[in-house]
Image (tube, helix red, strand yellow):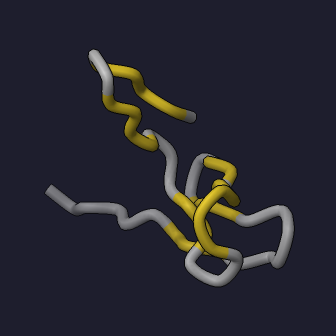
Amino acid sequence: MYKIEGNSITRVNHTCPKCGEGTFLAEHDNRYTCGRCGYTEFKRKDKN
């Protein structure tokens, strides 16, 4: 969830834009989902 480098802490996972800071999105195969409000972001499939 967090990465510590020296004296700084950064968030690694995505946060929910509706619930705000501190509520992380669960990562699935094709989407990110908030367990609190149900917000969903679908991952993009790049065709190369």
Of residues 6 and 43, the one nearer the viewer is 6
Query: Residue 3 placed where, x, y %?
Result: 42, 27
Q: Quadrant of residue 8?
A: top left
Q: Residue furthest bottom?
A: 18
Image side of residue 1 versus residue 22, left or right: left
Up the image or down, 29 lies above or below 2; here it is below
Q: Residue furthest front?
A: 7
Up the image or down, 29 lies above or below 19; here it is above
Question: Quarter holding the C terminus?
Answer: bottom left
Up the image or down, 8 lies above or below 20; here it is above
Q: Residue furthest left?
A: 48
Query: Residue 2 placed where, x, y %?
Result: 50, 32
Image side of residue 34 versus residue 43, left or right: right
Which residue is painted at 56% across and 78% down in the image? Answer: 17
Image side of residue 46 versus residue 38, left or right: left
Q: Quadrant of residue 30?
A: bottom right
Q: Residue furthest top?
A: 6
